[in-house]
Image (spheres, rainbow, N blue to C red):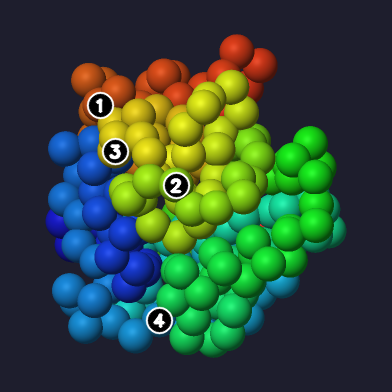
């Protein structure tokens, strides 16, 4: 196999585009769909479990290093929901708009100061030789009362990151990538990919610009 080729274990076009922009150019990226791979259902109870389910299947089927992420929105006033059910919150085949509208309906009577939330992403890396690792990224924010902005995907139009006056959907791609949970998780994941693929990640912009002053790399072996 190509030592610098990886498979993204996702069929979500928004995630594929975002991950391709964020990964260093020395890594050749192919998606599960492009390889004709079928991914198993996300039956895990945590983001880490779901990411590992997908990455293990893709690595086994392709013989390539696989990268999978599972991510979602955790709203404090809803006890952490939608969480791992973020992509199908309004139903198994719900659209982004339907998910957003259900969430806003549930928060209709919640005051602005109690609409705290966070995006969380966990990236799983699985090597065909059996090595596994996890990386996590989190961005804190609040839920606004109506969709704002046309960019991004998922819950981006209603999530305003802490310390900012615009939602993710009102930001440019580069602005979002400097803040997002997925970018923060990937920052840590590329350190592992560098070791596995012998690919220099210098000059990629992923070596610390996404990390806040009190954050340290959140990487760990998968269990």
Q: Answer left or right for 223 relative to 192.
A: right
Give the residue pinned by disc 4: 39
Q: Nearer the viewer, mark 3 or mark 1?
A: 3
Front disc: 3 or 2: 2
Residue to which mark 2 is pinned: 148
Q: Residue 110's spot in the image, x, y percent?
A: 80, 52
The answer for how far apart the CA atoms under marks 4 and 1 are is 29 Å
Q: Is residue 160 above or below residue 54?
A: above
| Number of the front mark, 2 or 1 | 2
**Relative to 59, residue 93 above or below:** below
| Precedes in sequence: disc 2 or disc 1 | 2
Q: Which mark is residue 204?
A: 1
Q: Using residue 205 as the reference point, say whether residue 83 is left or right of it.
A: right
Among numbered discs 3 and 2, the one appearing first in the sequence: 2
What SS does tag 3 mark?
helix
Residue 218 appears in the picture as rendered: no
Q: Which residue is mark 3?
A: 173
Q: Distance of mark 3 from mark 1, alpha carbons?
A: 16 Å
Q: Quadrant of the N terminus?
A: bottom left
Which residue is drawn at the image coordinates 32% and 48% (left, top)? 151
Disc 4/disc 3 C-alpha distance (Å): 27 Å
- Which label sits in the foreground, 4 or 2? 2
Q: Which mark is residue 80?
A: none
Name the element at disc 1. Answer: loop
* Disc nearer the start of the sequence (3/1): 3
State which quadrant residue 72 falls in.
Answer: bottom right
């Amino acid at each position: 196999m190509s030592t610098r080729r990886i498979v993204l274990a996702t069929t979500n076009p928004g995630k594929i585009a975002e991950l391709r922009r964020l990964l260093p150019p020395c890594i050749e990226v192919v998606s599960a769909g492009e390889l004709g791979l079928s991914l198993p259902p996300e039956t895990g109870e945590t983001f880490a479990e779901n990411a590992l389910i997908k990455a293990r299947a893709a690595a086994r089927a392709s013989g390539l290093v696989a990268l999978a992420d599972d991510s979602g929105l955790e709203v404090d006033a809803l006890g952490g929901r939608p969480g791992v059910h973020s992509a199908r919150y309004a139903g198994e085949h719900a659209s982004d708009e339907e998910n957003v509208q259900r969430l806003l309906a549930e928060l209709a009577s919640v005051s602005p100061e109690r609409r705290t939330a966070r995006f969380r992403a966990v990236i799983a890396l699985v090597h065909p030789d059996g090595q596994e690792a996890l990386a996590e990224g989190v961005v804190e924010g609040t839920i606004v009362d109506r969709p704002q902005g046309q960019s991004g995907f998922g819950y981006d139009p209603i999530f305003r990151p802490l310390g900012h006056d615009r939602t993710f959907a009102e930001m440019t791609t580069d602005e979002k990538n400097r803040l997002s949970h997925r970018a923060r998780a990937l920052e840590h994941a590329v350190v592992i990919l560098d070791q596995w693929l012998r690919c220099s990640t210098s000059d990629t912009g992923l070596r610390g610009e996404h990390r806040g002053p009190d954050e340290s790399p959140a990487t760990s072996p998968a269990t």
